[in-house]
Image: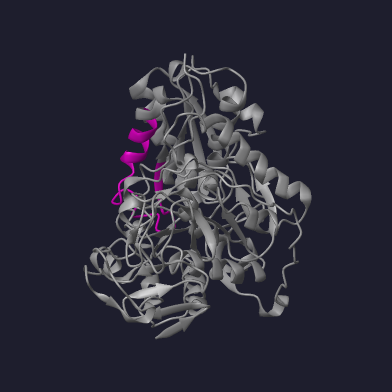
């Protein structure tokens, strides 16, 4: 039997809290198999990562995991039975937000003891982890053009510019057919501007059509962007059409490459690092291995002066009180609840989305019954430190420490918002094996279990399943993740970078009304 942080791993199951009425199967359990540590027999097969009742649970009684309610029994559940969405009812719960009641200031390490990495220092003092040239479209009508410009710059054509990581297009299906003003347009422009001015871009081209609602001039004015050595703009209807705009864009990038290549890495404090936290394709082990281990890494990062962005508003629903209590102020805590309520107002009536309880098919197969159970693990990515600020989607992150950004739970638009807000590195946990990468900020993939890691090792950067295997503690894995963050921020390629992922994952969260 292995004890880790209050958890008890014994034989084929893990007990997360003494008061729980379920345990988690570490491996597949057969019908009739004895669970010696709990003194019971499995009444039916239970898949790895799924829950098993350890006592009789009456219809309507709360089901507890980590001593937290994750649902209610739909019918009487016998000891040794599988506990999943076939016999678990989702029900909204009242929560005591207790704003800022548990706030404790971060205990920073002395500056002389803080970690460093090899970053690229820009002229304005900001520090990059990568060095791309970006081509942004204002509207779907210029999407092909920005892609053709980027595609011209093959590895062979960039061979003379070894310090440039690539030329990447950021295209999207938006920019017209929506309101000229309001939240949707503000969010679209905020996202594009966040990428256009991102520290990981040495220079940017912005390409518009000319008659779209999201005009290039309006985008620039809204975010105080000014054309210059690092920012050039093109309008297809003025330049002369598709072919001529592609040629002009290629010529512009050629002119920008020599200056973009004149960079070098230097030692900088980790306080310059902003890490976006993401999870996708979760399983029953996410809250046991990868998510708490990433949380441990975040606690280290924050003590060293760095910043982490927790996101996916629908996937902290049910655990939001654990964040509001740690908020630096009542006002910050209330900002988070305001965003939760926005989601509930928009999506609460008759829609089978996560905030109403229904998680994705992959999450269900992985052992998660509903959003309460998923959120319980998802919130762990933020560690245990104070919540310092709450941001809307793609807003510029300026606070240090743990912050929250309102994003959907779908990985590409969530990460897009984090990068637009300034994230220079992404840490992504997965139990099912999400195939994801991002540009211009590299993405690290954290596997929750060893079987999946071995199967998908080309895509996974680190195996947090070693916690379940008894090879590392959560704290040791957190340290390993932190060290991998520093190495990646210093230029070491992530698995997704080696596979060439990131060219198609730019996805702006669309909340606009088309018409």
* Residue 183, position as x, y percentages in the image: 61, 27
Compared with 177, 3 (above or below) is below
| Residue 457 in sight from this viewpoint | no
Look at the image and name its color scheme: one colour
Span shown in magenta = 145-168
Compared with 513, 160 (above or below) is below
In this picture, residue 464 sits left or right of residue 151: right
Figure quadrant of residue 44: bottom left
Whether the magenta-drawn stretch holds residue 150 is answered as yes
Q: Is 255 in front, or is 49?
A: 49
* Residue 76, position as x, y percentages in the image: 39, 55
User: Residue at image x 62%, y 37%?
Assistant: 341
Figure quadrant of residue 367: bottom left
Q: Is 301 in front, or is 148?
A: 301
Q: Give the total of numbered labels.
A: 0
User: Residue at image x 48%, y 39%?
Assistant: 356
Figure quadrant of residue 493: bottom left
Q: Is 76 in front, or is 416?
A: 76
Compared with 397, 385 (above or below) is below
Compared with 221, 44 (above or below) is below
Whether the magenta-drawn stretch holds residue 232 is answered as no
* Residue 167, position as x, y percentages in the image: 40, 45
Q: Quadrant of the N terminus?
A: bottom left
């Amino acid at each position: 039997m292995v004890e880790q942080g209050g958890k008890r791993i014994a034989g084929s199951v893990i007990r997360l809290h003494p008061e729980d009425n379920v345990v988690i199967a570490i491996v597949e359990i057969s019908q009739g198999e004895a669970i010696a540590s709990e003194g019971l027999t499995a009444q039916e097969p239970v898949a790895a990562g799924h829950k098993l009742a350890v006592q009789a649970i009456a219809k309507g009684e709360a089901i507890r995991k980590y001593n937290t309610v994750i649902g209610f029994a739909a019918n009487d559940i016998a000891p040794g039975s599988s506990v999943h969405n076939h016999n678990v009812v989702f029900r909204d719960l009242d929560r005591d937000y207790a704003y800022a009641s548990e706030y404790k200031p971060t205990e920073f390490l002395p500056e002389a003891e803080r970690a460093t990495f090899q970053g690229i220092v820009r002229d304005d003092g900001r520090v990059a982890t990568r060095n791309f040239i970006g081509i942004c479209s204002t509207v779907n009508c210029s999407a092909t053009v920005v892609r053709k410009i980027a595609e011209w710059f093959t590895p062979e054509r960039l061979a003379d510019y070894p310090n440039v990581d690539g030329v990447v297009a950021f295209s999207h299906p938006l920019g017209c057919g929506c309101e000229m003003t309001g939240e949707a347009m503000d969010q679209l422009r905020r996202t594009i501007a966040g990428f256009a001015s991102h520290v990981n871009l040495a220079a940017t081209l912005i390409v518009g059509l000319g008659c779209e609602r999201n005009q290039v001039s309006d985008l620039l004015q809204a975010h105080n962007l000014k054309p210059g050595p690092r920012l050039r703009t093109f309008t297809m209807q003025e330049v002369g059409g598709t072919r001529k705009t592609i040629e002009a864009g290629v010529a512009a990038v050629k002119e920008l490459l020599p200056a973009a290549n004149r960079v070098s890495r230097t030692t900088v404090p980790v306080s310059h690092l902003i890490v976006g936290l993401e999870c996708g394709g979760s399983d029953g082990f996410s809250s046991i291995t990868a998510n708490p281990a990433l949380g441990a890494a975040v606690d280290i990062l924050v003590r060293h002066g760095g910043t982490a962005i927790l996101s996916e508003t629908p996937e902290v629903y049910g655990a939001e009180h654990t964040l509001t209590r740690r908020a630096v102020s009542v006002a910050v805590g209330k900002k988070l609840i305001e965003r939760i309520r926005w989601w509930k107002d928009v999506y609460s009536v008759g829609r089978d989305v996560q905030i109403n309880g229904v998680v994705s098919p992959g999450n269900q197969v992985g052992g998660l019954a509903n959003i309460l159970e998923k959120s319980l693990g998802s919130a762990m990515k933020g560690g245990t430190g104070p919540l310092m600020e709450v941001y809307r989607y793609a807003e510029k992150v300026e606070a240090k420490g743990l912050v929250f950004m309102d994003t959907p739970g779908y990985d590409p638009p969530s990460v897009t918002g984090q990068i637009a807000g300034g994230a220079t590195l992404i840490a992504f946990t997965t139990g099912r094996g999400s195939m994801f990468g991002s540009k211009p900020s590299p993405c690290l993939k954290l596997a929750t279990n060893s079987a999946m890691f071995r199967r998908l090792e080309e895509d996974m950067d680190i195996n947090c399943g070693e916690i379940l295997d008894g090879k590392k503690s959560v704290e040791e894995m957190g340290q390993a993740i932190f060290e991998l963050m520093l190495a990646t921020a210093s230029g070491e390629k992530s698995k997704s970078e080696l596979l060439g992922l990131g060219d198609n994952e730019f996805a702006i969260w669309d909340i606009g009304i088309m018409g």
